[in-house]
Image (tube, grey):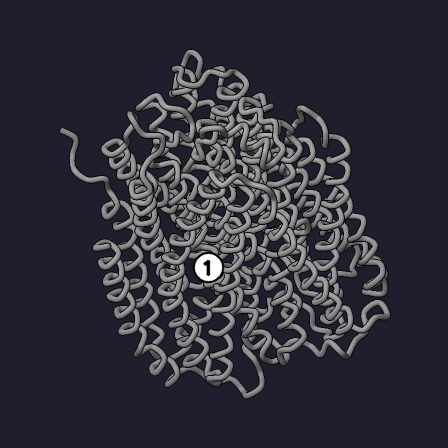
Amino acid sequence: MRSMREMSRALSRALTCVVLMMVLMPAMALAQAPQEPAGEPRAGGEVNLVLPDLSSVDVGGYSSRGLLMIGLGVSALGMLFGLVILTQLKNLPVHRSMREISELIYETCKTYLQTQGKFIALLEIFIAAVIVLYFGVLSGLEPLRVGIILLFSVVGILGSYGVAWFGIRVNTYANSRTAFASLEGRPYPVYAIPLKAGMSIGMLLISVELLIMLFILLFIPGDYAGPCFIGFAIGESLGAAALRIAGGIFTKIADIGSDLMKIVFNIKEDDARNPGVIADCTGDNAGDSVGPSADGFETYGVTGVALITFILLAVKDPSIQVKLLVWIFVMRVMMIIASAGSYLVNEAIAKARYGNASKMNFEAPLTQLVWLTSIVSVVATYFVSHALIADLGDGTLWWKLSTIITCGTLAGAIIPELVKIFTSVESSHVHEVVTSSKEGGPSLNILSGLVAGNFSAYWLGLVIVALMSIAFFVSDSGVSMSDIMLAPAVFAFGLVAFGFLGMGPVTIAVDSYGPVTDNAQSVYELSVIESLPGIEQELKKDFGLNVQFGKAKEMLEENDGAGNTFKATAKPVLIGTAVVGATTMIFSIIMELTLGLTQNLDKLSLLHAPFLLGLVTGGSTIYWFTGASMQAVTTGAYRAVEFIKANIKLDGVKAASVEDSKKVVEICTLYAQKGMFNIFLTVFFATLGFAFVESFFFIGYLISIALFGLYQAVFMANAGGAWDNAKKIVETELKMKNTPLHAATVVGDTVGDPFKDTSSVALNPVIKFTTLFGLLAVSLAEGLRHGEYAGITGILAGVFILISMVFVYRSFYGMRIGGKVH
């Protein structure tokens, strides 16, 4: 608690410093800044964007507003779909011993989320200060419009926070129900329950996001919609960054602390006597459910806002603007329907094939679902596009845009297949990790995992380049796209990111499958159900079950391997979306700086030194972030291990005390927040500082963090996935737990834990938050740079960068385990 008070005081001091530095800036700038004619927005000023009248143009012979109103109805049905599944999961049979464990996990998750909510509220103060300063003071917007931006930034935060909460509630119902279903000895329910939980989260998440954006389009006046979208995107980006980063730190502190006990005390996986196991289960939800839910919500929204901004900036004809906006949102509605329909069809096929089987490949129906959804979405894309925009441009634009989106939709299926080559339990790379561990122990285990990660980054990078190249060539063929918009290639890249998210509910579903299967295995062990007196007779009498404990444990472990694989497949999809989508947001900044691509184009060149220096600087930030997030895990895990080793009781007890388990959760929460505190403030002040250095330097910086971040994230995610499933092979296929080989793979897995679930996944929201917040930061800097006191921007750049370096320093020297080795 003392550390939390110290953090709060440091936060207050930092905020006071910011306010003192900034309070004189607006007056000086406004005194000298050239005033623009009333009613003429500054080029590229996103807040000044005005949505065209949607009722002015029919699309494909249909009322534009009518089509979007149908979208509202579909979104509401999607939310209902998610809530109905939640109720079904809650009502599934479960033994009280398992239900009690899942409810304990949920209670610890609630405590964690409540703490995070307070922390995010503090972070919002920083964003609000910049919003008020730029929009309210420097840009001279009336208080109502500034209030709307602030309001929708809060809506964005609450959206990310709310879907994250829903995700843990669904998963903590599903984990105990999955564990109980395994007792019957049939694999199909063990697969079907986690997937149903994932679809519940995916459908509700995407539907809520779409509902909010459609509400802004339909019911907010056109001249206020721009501020609403910007505020909403900033809020959800802040919420996702905080939940993803802190969740990733929390879960890996707990996971490493729990896993190392297997080696130290030679105890089994998820041993109920280990007080770290409850924290590990909480972390599975904090990192693998809360993080992806908030991240997916934000990714879907920010990509949409980027495309809306592009259309309004780059397309001059209001009627074409309407057609493209309506087309994009109808496509999103269609993809919700395609995902739900594909899931229902796939489940019918899977149930017919595996419903009464005694053994199944858990990965097979998940792979089938991904490909089925992709194919259905591609077909629907061409059909809907022809129906709505066949008359756009020269008559070829409908299929060109459909082809570009298809590049992204196919990426959502192709990338998971490539990821499985490096992370699946059937992967030759993963088997190489196991083989190398037999004679080489942890050393060769780690080296083999690094090989898998590096190879994966190469191949996935080429695939992303190939798909973006196809999109570019299609956008560049003929003249139809260049006739109606500026920079059609940028729009094409944005549509590729849009296509990545086309299977949004299914992508989230297969990602959420993992934390449920992981928790289910833990709930089974923590319930100590096998040792309960008269349990077999009780289960027979109350549930009609002839239990098969041995087979149940075997199936849960195998299914956990499938969960590991599909958790791994979603990560590159989300990071790929962030990088490709960032291109579109960076274009918005370029539009502002070049006054609609009419000036300063020579500064977007390697011959312009600040631009080149920005490219170099961005990479350093990525490597700092990787180190800072892993340092938080390292120190937190050390403290967790220290406590567990001192307090674990192996003799005379069946389970660890709730108090000890909660103490481990407290340690994880403390270091997750300390790490997040330093990381967020570094990113915040670095973004401001680099934007104030020079605007084209900042463009280079944004491009650099996107590219460095892409490869760092893919490399780390897939290396971690290989180490994780190498351990799973030793446990399930080789049956060699508690052997030197198992110990070697556990060590590799503990290295891979922060690789795949902390640093790599958090790069996605960091890239998007930096780019989106950069829209405000660079506009703020440009506004100040135009006045008589232009020299103040250099001073402020130095101050902001210095503050960011203070938090860089704290991210290591303030987070060290401490003391020299004697």
Left or right: 133, with 718 as reference point: left
* Residue at 46 percent of width and 59 percent of height: 239
Question: Residue 508: in sight, yes or no?
Answer: no
- Snapshot quadrant of residue 115: bottom left
State whether residue 572 is above or below residue 139.
Answer: above
Of 756 and 698, nearer the camera is 756
Left or right: 436, with 18 as reference point: right
Position of the N terminus, as image quadrant, is bottom left
Residue 349 percent location from the top left of the image? 77, 36
State whether residue 117 is above or below residue 135.
Answer: above
Of 590 and 605, nearer the camera is 590
* Residue at 77 percent of width and 34 percent of height: 352
Label 1: which secondary element = helix
* Residue at 49 percent of width and 65 percent of height: 775
Residue 778 percent location from the top left of the image? 45, 66
* Residue at 62 percent of width and 41 percent of height: 193
Question: Residue 655: in sight, yes or no?
Answer: yes
- Snapshot quadrant of residue 18: bottom left
Residue under label 1: 239
Q: How many marks overall? A: 1
Of 188 and 156, nearer the camera is 188
Position of the C terminus, as image quadrant, is top left
What residue occupies the far top of the structure in this picture?
439
State whether residue 613 is above or below residue 180.
Answer: below
* Residue type (three-letter) at the residue carrying disc 1: Gly
Left or right: 747, with 495 as reference point: left
Crowding around mark 1 (Cα neighbors within 10 Å: few <14, some 14 to 19, many 20+) is many
- Snapshot quadrant of residue 138: bottom left
Residue 263 percent location from the top left of the image? 34, 23
State whether residue 724 is above or below residue 793.
Answer: above
